Amino acid sequence: MDRVQAMQVFLRVVESGSFVRAAETLGLPASSVTGIIKRLEKHLQIRLLNRSTRNLSLTPEGERYFYRCREILDLIDDTESSLHGSSERPHGRLRVDMPGGIAHAVILPKLAQFQRRYPDIYLMIGINDRQVDLIQEGVDCVIRAGVLHDSTLVARRLGELRWITCAAPSYLDEKGIPAGLEDLHRHRAVHYFSGTARRGSQLHFTENGERVSVEVPGTVAVNETGMYIKLGLDGAGLMQLAEILVTEHLRTGELVEVLDDRRPAPLPVSLVYPHHRFLSPAVRAFADWTAELF
């Protein structure tokens, strides 16, 4: 049995979710794909896939084998690329996750540039504001804002985001413009929460060189950046977020920055990948390009 081919077929079956679709993309008969998986399971003496008439799913052993196969095949690709001098043109599938705000404000507007530069990379972008388990979810790398605490991950610093406090003119007409932190007791804020966020009811500032957190009451909390901005535009309260996410709204006057002399400390932005995972040319290419953007 050609174990490298068996790994390639196994990955394609899992990624396509179907023996038939995998066979079509590989240019093999469906019976050959089925046979290869059966021989692989027999060789390993474990069941990799749960099969039903409608669905395929990985067994726990199959899930571990899937992620290790991806690392092995990435390493083979990189080794061959380096020998043939093709590492300058990275290729393959790349799964990246990032917060919605960064995706819409930084990455997606320039995505065509990345595609022109690296036409052989198939980019899978996951957009969410939750903490992603890279290993369990098969993610090659993520963009994260904030200080990295997980020692099992490696972070490459991309840049930083400048944070501001702002609100809609309609809200400021109602509540007034705060002149200092002592004025915040008569204001309300739109709260943001996530699995890794600090307390959603706090706004953060820098005053006299010190970092200060202030409790600001509110009536609504959300965990998605687009909704957070929408509520701020609707006059629901003060917001605190990266300036780049609302640059256009600030320019048009739909939002107004307040307490600009007490801005929070900038937030570092990093590209993060598992410590034990092989860093493929595709990941390096994406990291270099993203660092350029920041």
Image (spheres, grey):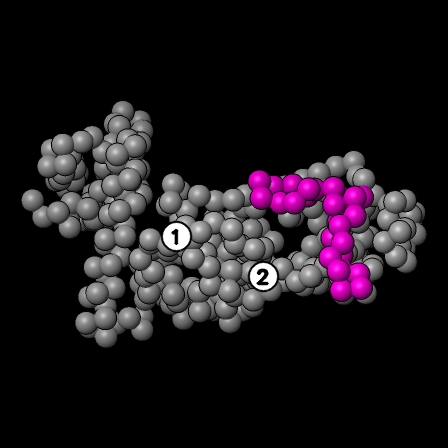
Per the model, the C-alpha gap separating discs 2 and 1 is: 19 Å
The residue positioned 67% from the left and 58% from the top of the image is 242
Q: Is residue 38 left or right of residue 135?
A: left
Q: Locate the N terminus by quadrant.
A: top left
User: Is residue 291 or residue 32 the one in the foreground?
Assistant: 291
Is residue 252 highlighted in magenta? no
Q: Secondary structure at mark 1?
A: strand
Tell me the quarter of the picture where residue 161 sits.
Answer: bottom right
The residue positioned 80% from the left and 64% from the top of the image is 208
Which of the two discs, 2 and 1, labels the residue nearer the N terminus?
2
User: Is residue 154 or residue 30 the one in the foreground?
Assistant: 154
Instruction: Specify whether residue 95 is in view.
Output: no
Residue underneath mark 1: 274
User: Is residue 256 or residue 137 the one in the foreground?
Assistant: 137
Q: Locate the C terminus by quadrant.
A: bottom right
92 up-or-down from 18: above or below:
below
Q: Which span is picked out in magenta?
A: 192-216
Instruction: Specify whether residue 210 is in view.
Output: yes
Horizontal and vertical percent for residue 283? 38, 61
- Residue closest to the far top: 53
- Residue closest to the far left: 1
Horizontal and vertical percent for residue 181? 85, 54
The residue positioned 81% from the left and 40% from the top of the image is 217
Tell me the quarter of the picture where residue 180 sits.
Answer: bottom right
The residue positioned 28% from the left and 40% from the top of the image is 64
Q: Amino acid at mark 1?
A: Pro
Marker disc for residue 153 = none
130 up-or-down from 278: above or below:
above
Residue underneath mark 2: 268
